[in-house]
Every structure is written in structure tokens, then in C-alpha cells.
Amino acid sequence: MKILLMEDDPVLGEIVTDYLQQYYTTHRAFDANEAGEMIDKGHYDLLIFDINVPGKSGIALLEELRSFNNTTPAIIITAYEDTAHLKKSFDAGAHDYIRKPFDLEELKLRIEKSRALFHIEQEEPVSLGGDMQYDPSRHQVTSGTKSYTLRPKEAEILEYFIAHPGRLISSDELVQNIWEFDEMPTDATLRSYIRKIREIIGKEKITTQRGMGYRYE
């Protein structure tokens, strides 16, 4: 599940982003201009917009997106206590809201409610051979009675391999299809992710052709 969080508060934004990244692929924007550019570049499954950000408000940005027929589910974050702002949020196209200050677990519950309501990423588990399966909706690999939850980037890498079995995939291809331009990882970071995936699913499932790339069998 890919989430775009628009929150300009440096402390709250970092706390929420770090928490959500444990469970979902989460990108953060500081204002409406940055959020709009990120939406133009890629698909998101859920939008989480604070109302009060510099420039265009979260409500105004959502209204603009809806005018362009963007139907991505949206949760509004608000510090307002009055119902007028809530009405504006719902009129703009939000389906849920959460008031500051909020508990991180409450936010996660609202995200999971959105996932169920809009049937986001309700894929069937994928066989990885033998009794091992991968559940894309949970980022979870199971084998017998054991289960392992992948970090968001590990899950994206594994899913890319699963979608391209038997094909030689270069490091550049992985990076270009999984990371945003301004967050490109080092070669060492990419190797670290792949090493962790191998530890979970078996080293023999992802082979390396030195200087050329990786192959998932």
C-alpha cells in the first residue's frame, strides 16, 4: 500500500512517516505544490492531508484533485474542533478525518479501515515454492508455522522480482522502478535489502550475475 502524507510540521511529519513506513510505502510532502508534483509522477493508494500547510490548504488541494477526476481515498488531518471544517473536508472529497493530537495506532486503524472499505491491495498470497507463500497485502512471507514481515522497500523489491521471473534485472532497473529520483539508494543499501530478502526466502531463489544484475527463479 502506497501512501502520500502531506504534513509540514517537521517533528510530527517525521514521527508519522517513520511509524507508517514500518507498515506501508510512505512518501511525505511538505506543501500542496510538492504533493501535487508527487501525485503527477506516480500512483498512490491513499492520501493523508493536513489542512493547514503553507500555501494551498489540504482541502483546496483535494478539491483540485477531485476536479481532475482523481478518486484516491483521502484522510484529512485537522487541528480544528468545529464542524465547519469537517463539512468542507467531506465536501471536498475526503472519506475520513483525524483530529490532532492523535495516537499513531489510531491513525493506523483508520488506514486499515480505508484499505478494507476501498478494497486496496486485497491480493491473494503468491507461492514462493514448497510451503512458502508471500502475502502482498501484509508484506508477509510465511513458511510452515513461521512468518516474516518485510519492510516496505524489501516488499517492493521482492514483488518486482516475482513479477519478472527468470529475467536478468540490473541494479539500475530496480532502483529506477522502486525509488523516487530524490531518494536513490547506494549500491550497498540495495545489496543490503536483497541480502535480507535472501535470508528470508532462500539464497538460491535470487542469483547474482556479477556486474550484470539479479535473477529470480
Image: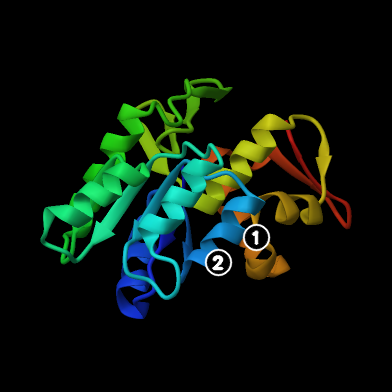
Q: Earlier in the sequence, mark 1 or mark 2?
A: 2
Q: Residue at 47% across / 20% down in the picture?
A: 124
Task: Quarter of the image for the C terminus: give it.
Answer: top right
Query: On the picture, is 114 further left or further right than 207?
Result: left
Q: Is residue 126 left or right of residue 85?
A: right
Residue 133 horizontal/vertical position (percent): 49, 26
The numbered disc on residue 34 is 2
183 relative to 114, above or below: below
Circle 1 residues within 10 Å: few <14, some 14–19, many ≥20:
some
Q: Please determine whether, in this image, residue 26 is positioned above or below residue 198.
A: below
Q: In this rendering, is residue 44 above or below 180?
A: above
Q: Nearer the viewer, residue 161 or 78?
A: 78
**Residue kind at label 2, given as amino acid type:** Glu
Residue 48 in view (yes/no): yes
The quarter of the displayed image where residue 146 is located = top left
**Which of the two marks, 1 or 2, is nearer to us in this view?**
2
Seen from this angle, which residue lies furthest right? 211
The residue at which mark 1 appears reads as 180
Quarter of the view holding residue 104: bottom left
In the image, taking residue 179 as reference, residue 124 lies left or right, namely left
Q: Secondary structure at mark 1?
A: loop
- Residue shown at 37% from the left, 28% from the top: 118
